[in-house]
Image (cartoon, grey):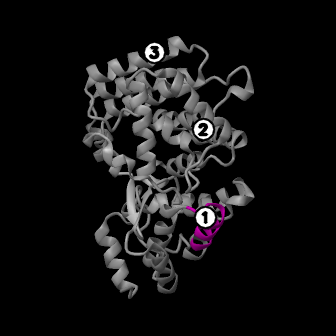
């Protein structure tokens, strides 16, 4: 959170200012760009979507190559490459089938212009993968029509064919290809042995790519057929697979995902999760990524959930009165926990 913005943005067209303002906050009298967390991730996605809509395929290639080769991360440690490819997800869009097919034709245009591009293939694979889930829908499996299952199967196969092969030149491979393959594997219902072999291959290729661990943890949740306590054990095992510089960080990242989006545990009264270990993970993340405002707020939230008032108070003082709201799942939660900690 060190980059301050000039006042020149005030002279920009209103519509641009309205979009841009969603990526800044004012702290201690300074206007500061939000550089990490879900807001910055969404900003990357919008930039990629705009380039794609304008058919600026060369610029997309350049951006992906930079993220891939330099292993570019947000200040919270998350890889920008992950959100480059997630920009092509179609599941959560309000596009109808006509619009989705037009979108895919544009991807084919990109692949035609760059026939050897792994980036274009992964982007198209992501689109087909999430278009497959769009066919299935978000309801319970027993409510999905036969046609929905068939469309899902056909689209997943299209996604798989795009990303299944290793490039002839290993240096041309991409972290995002393994991530897409793992997501496809879940959709296609790969058995444990085959999925685990893919996971080991992915981690061997790039042990620090967080997304592999998130998909694996998701795959072994009880709702997907995993055993009780399995993802919790995996969170501990994952620490040994990631670079030493990450410390306990991966344990914390997995637990944060399981508490928030997946709702796999509610609090630290659950004996299968450890605040002591999660706290150490946050401290290790702070050491590795000291400029992350998102991680700071997230650390404080979980200290509150764990009832660690002393840690929470210290972190609230660092945050001040202007939080990273998305880390708290709403401003009201921030204010509630602030009062709980006795912060004036």
Mark 1 to mark 3 CA distance (whole Å): 41 Å
Q: Considering only vertical position in the picture, is 64 above or below 23?
A: above
Circle 3: is it few (<14), some (14-19), or many (20+) Cα within 10 Å?
some
Q: Considering only vertical position in the picture, is 165 above or below 231?
A: above
Say whether marks 2 and 3 touch (CB < 8 Å). no
Outermost top residue:
112
Give the residue pinned by disc 3.
108
- The span picked out in magenta is 279-291
The local secondary structure at tag 1 comes to loop
Give the residue pinned by disc 1.
290
The x, y position of residue 134, in whole percent, is 33, 32
Q: Nearer the viewer, residue 286 or 280?
A: 286
The x, y position of residue 193, in whole percent, is 63, 40
Q: Kindly identify the residue that appears in the image at 47 percent across and 83 percent down.
A: 313
- The picture quadrant where one finds residue 197 is top right
Q: Nearer the viewer, residue 319 or 152?
A: 319
Circle 1: is it few (<14), some (14-19), or many (20+) Cα within 10 Å?
some
Q: Is residue 152 visible?
A: yes
Q: Kindly identify the residue that appears in the image at 39 percent across and 55 percent down.
A: 24
Which label's residue is closer to the chain start, 1 or 3?
Answer: 3
The x, y position of residue 20, in whole percent, is 35, 46
Q: Kindly identify the residue that appears in the image at 46 percent across and 22 percent down.
A: 56
Q: Nearer the viewer, residue 339 or 165?
A: 339
């Amino acid at each position: 959170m060190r980059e301050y913005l000039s006042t020149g943005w005030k002279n920009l067209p209103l519509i641009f200012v309205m979009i841009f303002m969603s990526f800044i906050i004012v702290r201690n009298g300074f206007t500061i760009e939000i550089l990490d967390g879900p807001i910055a991730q969404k900003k990357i996605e919008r930039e990629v979507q705009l380039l794609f809509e304008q058919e600026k395929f060369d610029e997309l290639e350049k951006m992906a190559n930079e993220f891939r080769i330099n292993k570019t991360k947000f200040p919270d440690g998350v890889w920008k490459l992950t959100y480059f490819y997630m920009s092509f997800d179609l599941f959560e869009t309000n596009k109808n089938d006509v619009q989705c097919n037009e979108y895919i034709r544009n991807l084919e245009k990109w692949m035609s212009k760059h026939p050897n591009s792994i980036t274009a293939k992964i982007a198209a694979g992501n689109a087909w993968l999430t278009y497959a889930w769009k066919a299935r829908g978000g309801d319970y499996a027993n409510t999905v029509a036969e046609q929905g299952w068939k469309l899902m199967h056909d689209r997943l196969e299209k996604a798989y064919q795009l990303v299944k092969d290793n490039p002839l030149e290993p240096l041309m491979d991409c972290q995002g290809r393994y991530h897409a393959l793992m997501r496809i594997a879940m959709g296609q219902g790969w058995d444990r042995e085959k999925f685990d072999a893919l996971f080991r291959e992915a981690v061997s290729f790039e042990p620090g790519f967080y997304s592999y661990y998130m998909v694996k943890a998701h795959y072994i949740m009880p709702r997907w057929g995993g055993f009780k306590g399995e993802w919790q054990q995996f969170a501990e095992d994952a620490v040994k697979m990631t670079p030493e510089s990450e410390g306990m960080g991966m344990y914390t990242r997995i637990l944060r995902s399981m508490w928030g989006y997946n709702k796999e545990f509610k609090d630290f009264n659950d004996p299968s999760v450890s605040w002591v270990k999660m706290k150490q993970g946050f401290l290790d993340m702070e050491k590795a990524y000291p400029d992350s405002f998102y991680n700071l707020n997230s650390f404080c939230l979980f200290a509150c959930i764990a009832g660690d008032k002393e840690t929470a108070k210290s972190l609230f003082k660092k945050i001040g009165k202007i939080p990273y709201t998305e880390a708290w799942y709403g401003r009201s939660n921030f204010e509630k926990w602030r009062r709980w900690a006795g912060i004036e």
